[in-house]
Amino acid sequence: MTATAAAPSPVPTRDVAVIGTVGLVHSTSHLFQFALPPMFPLLQAEFGVDYTALALVISTFYVASGLGQAFVGIVVDRYGGRVTLACGTTALSVGIGGMAFATDFWMLFPLALLAGAGNSVFHPADFSILSSRVSPHLTGRAFAIHAFGGTLGFAAAPVLLSTLGFAFGWRTALMLALVYGLAQALIVWQAKDLLGVGPHGTVPSRKESPREVLAGFGRLMTMPALLAAFAYLSMTSMAGGAVQSFGAATLSLLYSVDYQTATVAVALYLGGQALGILAGGFLADATDRHELVAGVGLVIAGAFILAILLPDRPYFFAEICFALAGVAGGVTAASRDLLVKKVAPAGAMGRTFGLVYSGFDIGLLIGPFVAGVLLDMGKPTLVPVAIALVFCSTFLVIRAVDAFGRANQAAKAAAAAR
């Protein structure tokens, strides 16, 4: 114990550097995920398409990201988090930045596939690096800052990309994003001493065949506990993705404000979410009722989103509701991660993480698409109604995840006692 307490000062400095580097790159992932929605009106004018078509581009991105994330943990285990993260950041940057050179609308779809494939590496690679390169007593805070950085990327996107896009053109904005993303990839690639060279953790004695890998995933996908956790993450990102992608368009129509003004409300939602994540970390450490924190928080978030439909309210009321909804949803993040961790089978944490958290991408695929269709139907009032319903109904799924998690922990404890 004495030796641990007297650890040399360079160790905390290295921890801060690792957490900061991974957190910064994670924020880039989220910034790029939300690069297009702030400039939707410009893309509509350029290509003559409707919101449904633009939502299909976003959905294409998340199809590639969701499918890739479920399996990319195998690549991380074999080649290491740093190499995988650098390659993924490059693909994401080229995919999103390459859209600046598109001359026809269809060109956005293959680029979205490339960007989504690149985006699929971030969670498995990031958590592999943080778990192995950060001092154990700092792991929890490292995870919280990782989530915080991602949310800040989401929060910066509507203001930064909207400002650049409307001031200098959407192509210029995406070209600047390309340069920024490639610089991030280069930093990760060069950080061998900081982020590691090869695989992290225990390397398997032999490589599994593709058939064995698929069989293993097949077993995981039939477990009710993991299916419930997958549904949980899918539903939360479905609602949150609709807010992020089409919240500005919805408010612009409901309150008759210009699109750039409406993007501020989305930035407030995401900024509130970032603050809620930090507060939720302390709350998760103070209680073991994580299902209550997660469930109540999402119900409150849904109530604030629904409140924007109250009649005769000024626009700043909607901004306040969005900000408070973000805080309420963000508070649930740490409790959510702890609930999901409880359902992981023994010895399958990495693959479980990749499989369950691919639900985020599936939700981000569905939510924006449905919101875009509702807007094209001329039904903007249905967008907040749908978002609120999904947020609130998640409460029931959370109860199921908690029940499975408690049973799984009891089974592990019983096995350990034998």
Image (tube, rainbow, N blue to C red):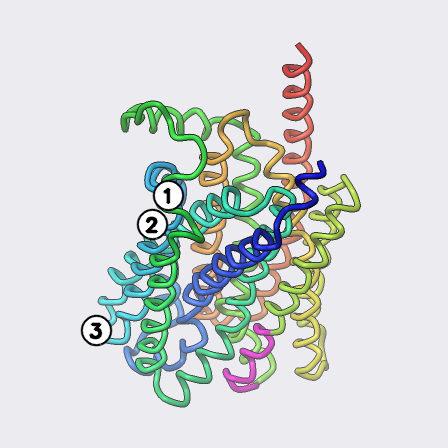
Label 3 sits on residue: 104
Query: Tag 1's secondary structure?
Result: loop
Label 2 sits on residue: 83
Please report whichever mark, 3 or 2, sits nearer to the chain's N-terminal start: 2
254, 57: nearer the viewer: 57
Query: Tag 3's secondary structure?
Result: loop
In the image, residue 377 above or below residue 127:
below
Residue 80 numbered mark, or none = 1
Residue type beneath disc 3? Asp
Quarter of the image holding residue 267?
Answer: bottom right
| Disc 1 and disc 2 in contact, CB within 8 angstroms | yes
201, 320: nearer the viewer: 201
How packed mark 1 is, by other alpha carbons closer than 10 Å (few <14, some 14-19, many 20 or more), is many
In the image, residue 345 above or below residue 101:
above
| Residue 247 in the image, given as x and y percentages of width and height | 54, 70
Q: Is residue 30 left or right of residue 2?
A: left
Is residue 258 part of the magenta span, yes or no?
yes
Task: Quote the CA–CA distance across marks 1 and 3.
Answer: 38 Å
Q: Residue furthest right?
A: 286
Which residue: 34% across, 40% down? 75
Residue 63 seen in this snapshot:
no
Quarter of the image holding residue 342?
Answer: top right
